Amino acid sequence: MALDQRTSATATRRPEESGRRVAAPTVAGSDVGSSGIDRRPARDRGPRGRRLGYLALGAALPILILVLWQLASTLGWVPAHRLPTPESVVLAAIDLGERGLLGLYVAISTQRVLIGFALGAIVGLVLGAIVGLSKLADGALAPTVGALRAVPSLAWAPLLLLYLGFGEDSKVALIAIGAAFPVYTTVAGALRHVDRQLVELGRAYGYRGVSLLATVQLPAIVPSVVSGLRLALAQSWLFLVAAELVGSTMGLGFLLIESQNNGRIDRLFLAIVLLAILGKTTDALVGLGERQLLKRWG
């Protein structure tokens, strides 16, 4: 009888104990509660959550600037002849777009920047490799190149117009000059500091000259090269405006100077906004290329 009672009591307790184990309360500090909701912060939710967080953070300041711009223009903090409303800038873009000028100006300026950037980057890469790998070339070329780098962009414009005329060649050449110097500086400096043991290892495998540069030294300085390219791209947009301010009849730089002469401040702000958007877009494309290069050689 006593054995039957103990067995019955044990059977009675086991379901309760089992139930307690299944429905055990969540341990303090757990990331997932009893409701199944992920309570981790966005930075702990993986790469996608981090990217969304960074996008939201990056969009906060432009939105704030747009709100302040709207308030300053509509509430009269700044006179209307000095600060147009965002709506008037949009209307100016629509007007130029309907007349077929906005897309044309954007396309022409982008084409000039990309061609000049490509030419300047190639020249800067070659010149930086020569100076960075040869002490003789460093002593012979570095002082002269450094002096030319200090010449302001607008100082080159009259000379290029004299030699190349008012066509596309002078504008592309000026942009190429602006793009070459950042690439030259970063590549030459980075090559001087490549690990000597890495270079000796490459030579032990039979690499010499151009093959050593392409196989060992350039992959070792990929982050520096990409940084130089991004600086060169920013310089290209700066030199574009200088090129189009002098002797141009199309492009965003021409739109800037024409708007200033005609008192169209809405178009002037439109040109500035478009330059900012295009510059950031091209920089983001270089950033995508950087990630691919780092995956391969980083």
Image: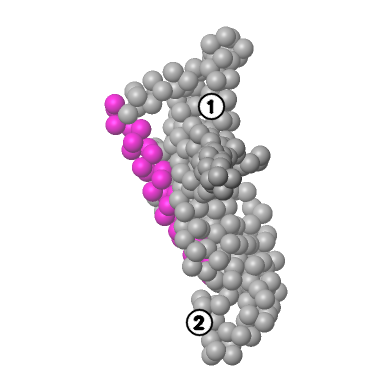
In the foreground, 63 or 193? 63
The N terminus: image quadrant? top right
Nearest to the eye among marks 1 and 2: give it. 1
In the foreground, 89 or 53? 53
Identify the residue position indicated by label 2 in the image.
Answer: 211
In the foreground, 256 or 217? 217
Reply yes or no: does residue 124 show up in magenta: yes
Reply yes or no: does residue 22 show up in magenta: no
Q: For the residue marked with disc 2, what is the amino acid?
A: Ser
Q: Which residue is depicted at the point 58% across and 15% down?
A: 72
Where on the picture, by quarter, is residue 17?
Answer: top right
Left or right side of 165 for 235: right
Main secondary structure found in the magenta portion = helix
Residue 183 picture location, percent across and down: 57, 61
Q: Is residue 136 visible in the rendered structure shown here? A: no
* Range shown magenta: 98-126
Q: Which residue is depicted at the point 55% across and 20% down?
A: 67
Q: Does 27 sit above or below residue 198?
A: above
**In the rendering, which numbered label is found on residue 63?**
1
Q: Does 125 sit above or below residue 7?
A: below
Q: For the residue marked with disc 1, what is the amino acid?
A: Ile
Q: Which residue is depicted at the point 53% across and 39% down?
A: 12
From mark 1 to mark 2, how far is it between C-alphas?
49 Å
Left or right side of 161 for 40: right
Where on the picture, by quarter, is residue 216?
Answer: bottom right
The C terminus: image quadrant? bottom right
